Image: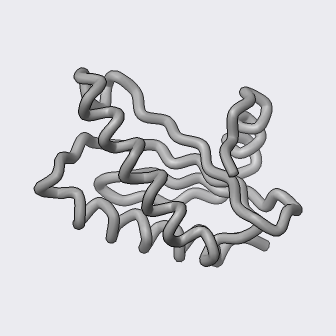
Amino acid sequence: MRLLKADEFSSVFSLRCSSSNDFFQVLGRPNGLDHARLGLVVGKKTDKRAVGRNYIKRTVRETFRLNANKVSGIDLVVRARRPFGRKEGAAAREALISLLGKIHKCRK
């Protein structure tokens, strides 16, 4: 359920439907499968400390796992735009869920 190879990422970047907010940018592309796949981009520019970047990745993966049924058949790349910690975690999860709903509409 993950995008791992560079070609998988580049195909989403080139043939994409995009939606974004303060926390994330979500790119999507139909994959022809019955399940969604997730790729993450959390760079050092987002948060210099690995602890912060890992927290962001864990939060995105868990939110995707709990809401994967809403976005079946799509390859997603989630790019973190700004860091967030435990205090803003709930707001970031809600923002990601709303973006997953928007990206699902442009699945065609």
Percent x, y of residue 25: 46, 51
Residue 13: image quadrant is top right
| Percent x, y of residue 54 | 35, 35
Q: Residue at x 25, y 34 (%)?
A: 52
The C terminus lies in quadrant: bottom right
Q: Residue, x 16% and y 52% (percent of image)?
A: 86
Seen as rendered, the residue at the extreme left is 87
Answer left or right for 43 relative to 107. left
Q: Is 103 above or below relative to 38?
A: below
Question: In this orientation, which residue lies closer to the viewer: 89 or 18?
Answer: 89
Image mark count: 0
Would you place residue 34 above or below residue 29 in this image? Answer: below
Q: Position of residue 44 (x, y in %)?
A: 34, 22
Q: Position of residue 83 (x, y in %)?
A: 24, 41
- Residue 46 shown left or right of residue 84 in the figure: right
Closest to the observer: 46 or 72?
Answer: 72
Position of residue 25 relative to residue 99, above or below, is: above
Question: In the image, is 41 to the left or to the right of 13?
Answer: left
**Residue at image point 60% right, 77% down:** 70
- Colouring style: one colour
Where is residue 14, by image quadrant?
A: top right
Residue ID at (29%, 60%): 92
Relative to residue 44, is residue 69 drawn left or right?
A: right
Q: Relative to 9, does residue 101 appear above or below in the rendering?
A: below
